[in-house]
């Protein structure tokens, strides 16, 4: 259709993507087989049927299970390469992707195995698909700050490959303030800072992420409109939100797409972007996220272009590289 063609034609960025969340069931079964691991599901179809979530935690439980089949460097390479070829077909030209080292190191897979596989695929994507990239290491917030510090230590030999740190996993009950010290230490090592905040958690968590963690971009941030003072701050400090509409729908952050506040967020003048979060679990990559949003809100071509431009603006590309795209 016309709308789909418009979306396909726009060069896009993706700024909120968990590599482990791009793990398609078909590849999961293939890797499980070669690693001699039996999944709790017999077939791709029965696994896909389990992808029905009432909240973030129900999703996370199954997401961490799936990640358990990733053992060798080749597995992390295949995971990342599959994601890159998929978004290349959707005209995504720049990505800033998360990985969750603790999901793997906790199981005895070493940090270097994980990052070597990911890095090789990202480099190949740059060479062969012309996709530029940044890599973000995310701390799991259901674990302790001490564990996050251990992960930071393990990351230091690979410091030049990692552009920023993030904070993800179970939000409610694990406020940003739990990680003040490790974010401060991460900043001292030169990492950029982002955090998931205000997805399921309250607007106070967005304040904490800004004031205590000193982040410069918010992942999700749906609850920001609950506080006019915060809205003012986001505008004045030019702090972007990486929104993920299909994720919000699948995790019941909203009951239906019509309930999403993305248009109000844009109309208030906040720098909002569209992203896919965990596309293998939520039924859509970048184009599907744009499409479902555009369809429900009847977004104009100018609005779609603005969203895509926001993606470049909010990215960590240099000003010169941004100018090449915008
Ligand atoms: N890990 C992967 N996806 C996530 C999300 N949407 N929120 C928190 N943690 C996550
Ligand atoms: Zn996320």
Image: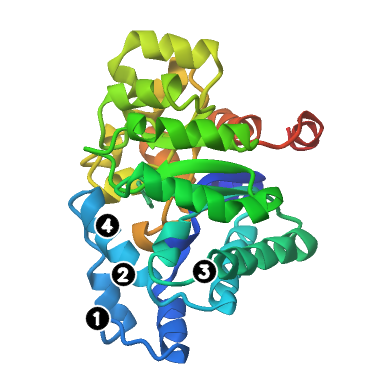
The picture places residue 164, in percent across and down from the top left corner, at 58, 41
Which numbered disc flags the more N-terminal residue, 3 or 1?
Answer: 1
Which numbered disc flags the more N-terminal residue, 1 or 4?
Answer: 1
Q: Quadrant of residue 30?
A: bottom left
Mark 1, Cα crowd under 10 Å, few <14 / some 14-19 / many 20+, is few
Residue bearing mark 3: 110
Residue bearing mark 2: 65
Assess mark 3: CB under 8 A from ligand 1? no
Residue at the spot 46% in from the left edge and 56% down from the top edge: 100
Residue bearing mark 1: 40
Residue at the spot 50% in from the left edge and 14% down from the top edge: 235
Assess mark 4: CB under 8 A from ligand 1? yes
The picture places residue 47, in percent across and down from the top left corner, at 28, 75
| Dot 1: element | loop
Q: CA distance from mark 3 to mark 1?
A: 24 Å
Which numbered disc flags the more N-terminal residue, 4 or 3?
Answer: 4
Which numbered disc flags the more N-terminal residue, 3 or 2?
Answer: 2
Q: CA distance from mark 1 to mark 2?
A: 9 Å
């Amino acid at each position: 259709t016309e709308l789909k063609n418009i979306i396909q034609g726009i060069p896009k960025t993706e700024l909120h993507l968990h590599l482990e969340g791009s793990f398609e069931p078909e590849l999961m079964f293939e890797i499980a087989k070669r690693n001699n691991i039996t999944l709790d599901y017999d077939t791709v179809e029965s696994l896909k049927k389990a992808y029905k979530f009432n909240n973030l935690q129900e999703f996370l439980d199954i997401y961490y299970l799936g990640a358990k089949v990733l053992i060798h460097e080749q597995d992390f390479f295949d995971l990342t390469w599959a994601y890159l070829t998929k978004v290349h077909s959707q005209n995504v030209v720049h990505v800033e992707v998360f990985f969750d080292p603790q999901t793997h190191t906790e199981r005895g897979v070493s940090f270097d195995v994980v990052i070597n596989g990911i890095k090789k695929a990202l480099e190949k994507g740059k060479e062969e698909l012309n996709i530029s990239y940044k890599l973000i290491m995310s701390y799991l917030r259901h674990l302790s700050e001490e564990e996050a510090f251990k992960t930071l230590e393990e990351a230091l030999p690979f410091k030049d490959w990692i552009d920023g740190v993030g904070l993800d996993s179970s939000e409610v009950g694990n406020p940003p303030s739990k990680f003040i010290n490790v974010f401060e230490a991460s900043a001292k090592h030169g990492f950029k800072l982002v955090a998931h905040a205000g997805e399921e958690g309250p607007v106070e968590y967005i304040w904490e992420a800004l004031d205590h963690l000193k982040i410069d971009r918010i992942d999700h941030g749906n609850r920001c409109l609950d506080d006019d003072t915060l809205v003012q701050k986001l505008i004045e400090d030019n702090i972007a939100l990486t929104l993920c509409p299909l994720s919000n729908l699948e995790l019941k952050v909203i009951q239906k797409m019509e309930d999403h506040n993305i248009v109000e967020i844009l109309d208030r003048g906040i720098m909002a972007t569209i992203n896919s979060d965990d596309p293998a679990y939520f039924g859509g990559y970048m184009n599907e996220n744009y499409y479902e949003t555009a369809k429900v809100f009847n977004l104009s071509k100018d609005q779609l272009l603005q969203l895509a431009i926001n993606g470049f603006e909010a990215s960590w590309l240099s000003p010169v590289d941004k100018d090449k795209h915008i």
